[in-house]
């Protein structure tokens, strides 16, 4: 059993190998919410953006599993996950659609798991439309701890980013 702390201590090269060797996921088993922790970004980028976030997954009216991200108060990797709010609503961003990974596994060679496709849920001219997150189970048969990464898709070409993340199911 791999624990989150072991992933948090890995280099980007180790995370990429772990992602490529990850275990399959059932899309339907993702429904719910996960606390995310960004990994691999330079410290300056993390300070300007965020380290923790939430990803929520739900079944859409079309039957597909969809989701979005929720901004959290930054209270450290293990602090409480408190959503930032605008009035009475959580601040959300980055809607995506979940589907099978690319046949070639994309730039991370990730053929297992699922792909969070921001292009399928955002207008073509949106900066988010190029984002893709391959996502795998870290421990076989469990959706409690997941590992993902981010790349940019440009038609048949793609560009890896240094951004990895863990997701832990929230109670």
Image (cartoon, rainbow, N blue to C red):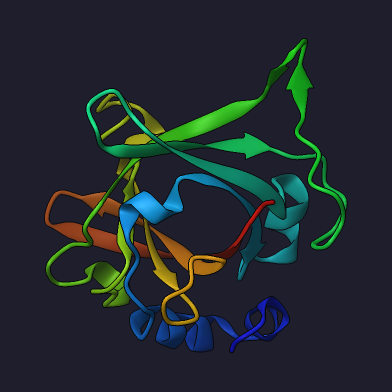
Image coords of residue 37 (percent x, y): 67, 60
| Residue at the far top in the pictured view | 87
Q: From the viewer's perspective, is 87 left or right of 97?
A: right
Give 162 or 64, whichever is nearer the viewer: 64
41 vs 67: above or below: below
* Picture quadrant where residue 67 is located: top left
Q: From the viewer's perspective, is 138 left or right of 28?
A: right
Image coords of residue 149 (percent x, y): 45, 64
Q: From the viewer's perspective, is 22 left or right of 142?
A: left
8 vs 48: above or below: below
Image coords of residue 142 (percent x, y): 48, 72
Give the mark count.
Answer: 0
65 vs 170: above or below: above
Residue 97 visible from this viewpoint: yes
Q: From the viewer's perspective, is 94 left or right of 76?
A: left
Question: At 12% across and 56% down in the image, what residue appears?
Answer: 156
Give 25 or 167, whichever is nearer the viewer: 25
Quadrant position of the N terminus in the picture: bottom right
20 vs 42: above or below: below
Question: At 45% across and 85% down in the image, what residue appears?
Answer: 18
Question: At 77% across and 10% down in the image, what residue appears?
Answer: 87
Question: At 44% across and 52% down in the image, what residue appears?
Answer: 30
Image coords of residue 157 (percent x, y): 18, 59
* Picture quadrant where residue 112 is located: bottom left
Give 125 or 91, whichever is nearer the viewer: 91
Residue 163 visible from this viewpoint: no
Give 113 or 18, whichever is nearer the viewer: 113
């Amino acid at each position: 059993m791999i624990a989150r702390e072991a992933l948090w201590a890995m280099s980007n090269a180790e995370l990429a190998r772990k992602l490529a060797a990850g275990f399959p996921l059932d899309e339907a088993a993702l429904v719910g919410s996960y606390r995310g922790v960004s990994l691999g970004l330079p410290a300056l980028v993390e300070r300007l953006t965020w380290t923790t976030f939430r990803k929520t997954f739900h079944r859409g009216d079309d039957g597909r599993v969809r989701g979005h991200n929720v901004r959290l108060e930054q209270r450290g990797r293990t602090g409480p996950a408190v959503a930032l709010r605008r009035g009475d609503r959580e601040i959300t961003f980055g809607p995506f659609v979940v589907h099978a990974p690319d046949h070639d596994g994309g730039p991370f060679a990730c053929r297992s798991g699922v792909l969070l496709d921001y292009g399928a849920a955002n207008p073509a001219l949106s900066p988010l439309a190029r984002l893709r997150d391959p996502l795998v189970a870290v421990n076989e048969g469990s959706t409690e701890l997941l590992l993902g990464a981010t790349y940019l898709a440009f038609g048949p070409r793609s560009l890896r980013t240094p951004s990895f993340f863990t997701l832990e199911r929230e109670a």
